[in-house]
Image: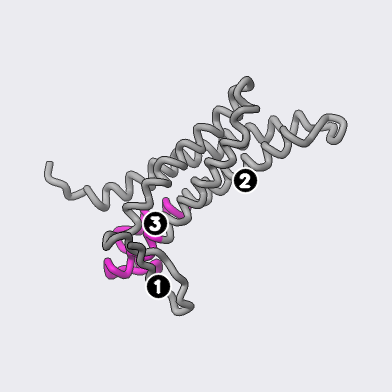
Amino acid sequence: MLVAHGNDVEDERVLTTIAGLPAHPLLVHLSVVAVPLGAVLLLLWALVPRWRARLRAVTVGVTAVAFLASVVAKSTGEALLPAMGLSEHSPGEVGPHAQYADLLVVAVGLCLGAGVCLYAAERWLTPQRFARRDTLVLVLRVLAVLVALFALVMTALTGHAGAQLVWGNFPH
């Protein structure tokens, strides 16, 4: 059973529970899988010439799913704050995890943007249409590598900070 809970004065609807369990730890797993997969596909697309044509559409699709998953994970995490006696303005010990999550959404958005631009440049630009096509594609590939690495680092930092919150006091 899906339950939504309004968390703002504007009554913005945010999914907070699934079958009585907090939605965030359940939904975050899609982001944990999709973001690194999209980033690795973007790296392969940018760095392995023989795979480029096959990876274009799949990479853009996976990074789109990763972006949506990271936005949903972030919003469901924010929806958990009141239940913990916290808020976005006063996140307490959740603060580092929330800040990393903000940067993760940016990183995945940049991956999606780089992928869409690279797709368009490789697919529709020709040297006859745009004299500097090869230079543009090279710059986009370098950008794709950088944002993919950024997304991988932010996934690790965000996940680690979240795991510390949940498991940090686990008996050794």
Name the residue located 47 percent from the left edge and 48 percent from the top edge: 104
On screen, 167 above or below 127? below
Residue 83 visible? The answer is yes
Residue that label 1 marks? 7
Instruction: Confirm or deny contact between disc 1 and disc 2 (CB under 8 A).
Output: no
**Element at label 3:** helix
Indicate whether residue 82 is drawn in magenta: yes
Q: Give amino acid for label 3.
A: Ala
On screen, 61 above or below 126? below
Residue 162 pos. (x, y %): 32, 50
> Residue farthest to the right?
128
Residue that label 3 marks? 98
Residue range highlighted in magenta:
76-103
- State the residue in front, 162 or 99: 162
> Residue farthest to the bottom?
9
Name the residue located 85 percent from the left edge and 32 percent from the top edge: 131
